[in-house]
Amino acid sequence: MAKKGEGQRTFFRIMTVIGVLVIGGLVYSFLGAAPDLSDSTYHKNSPSAEECMQCHVQHLDKAPIMPHRPMGSCTFCHQPPD
Ligand code: HEC
Ligand code: HEC
């Protein structure tokens, strides 16, 4: 096997760093895009994911429809007001 040149090694290092930064940036911006919970009576006492969805899979009381699939703990991304 031919030994890889130092230039090629540097190239792969740079590509790895760029890859990690892009993926990290996408994850970070996706989490940051989730709107925080409004400080309303609906969102008091940390409702469970099932309770969240009872309002948010239909237009109950003008609740916006959840625009994505159910994803585990809602409050991981949607920060409660307090
Ligand atoms: C009793 C019904 C009800 C429950 C339970 C409920 N919501 Fe809501 N939610 C609403 C209504 C109504 C609105 C729109 C009015 C408002 O923002 O207060 C809303 C607004 C939102 C918004 C948009 C806020 C914004 O500023 O754009 C998000 C995100 C949200 N809810 C997520 C959740 C999550 C996550 C849970 C569970 C922890 C949850 N909701 C539980 C009724 C509910
Ligand atoms: C992995 C992160 C993540 C999780 C977990 C998550 N969401 Fe979201 N949610 C988002 C993002 C990002 C948006 C904004 C999407 C957009 O604007 O297109 C959003 C938008 C919403 C909205 C629309 C808000 C509006 O103002 O229109 C509702 C409602 C909502 N989510 C409810 C929920 C519920 C209920 C759960 C739990 C079953 C949940 N989300 C779990 C990331 C998440």
Image: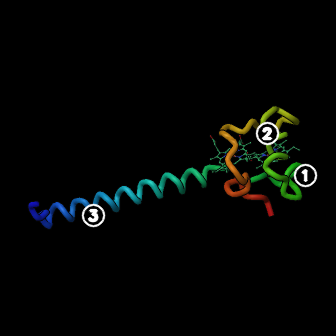
Q: Residue at x 77, y 58 (%)?
A: 80
Judging by the rendered image, the residue that carries numbered circle 2 is 56
Q: Quadrant of the C terminus?
A: bottom right
Judging by the rendered image, the residue that carries numbered circle 1 is 41
Lateral position of residue 47 relative to residue 26, left or right:
right
Pointer 2 residue Cβ closer than 8 Å to ligand 2: yes
Task: State the SS at label 2.
Answer: helix
Three-letter code, disc 2 = His
Q: Nearer the viewer, mark 3 or mark 1?
A: 3
Which residue occupies the extreme front position in the image? Answer: 1
Judging by the rendered image, the residue that carries numbered circle 3 is 13
Depth check, front residue: 37 or 15: 15
Three-letter code, disc 1 = Thr
- The mark that comes first in sequence, 1 or 2, is 1
User: x%, y% of residue 34?
Assistant: 65, 50
Q: Disc 1, disc 2: CB below 8 Å?
A: no
Residue 7 vertical position relative to residue 65 in the rendered view, above or below: below
Q: Residues within 10 Å of mark 2 (few under 14, many from 20)?
A: some
Q: Residues within 10 Å of mark 1 (few under 14, many from 20)?
A: few
User: x%, y% of residue 61?
Assistant: 88, 36
Residue 53 vertical position relative to residue 32 in the rendered view, above or below: above
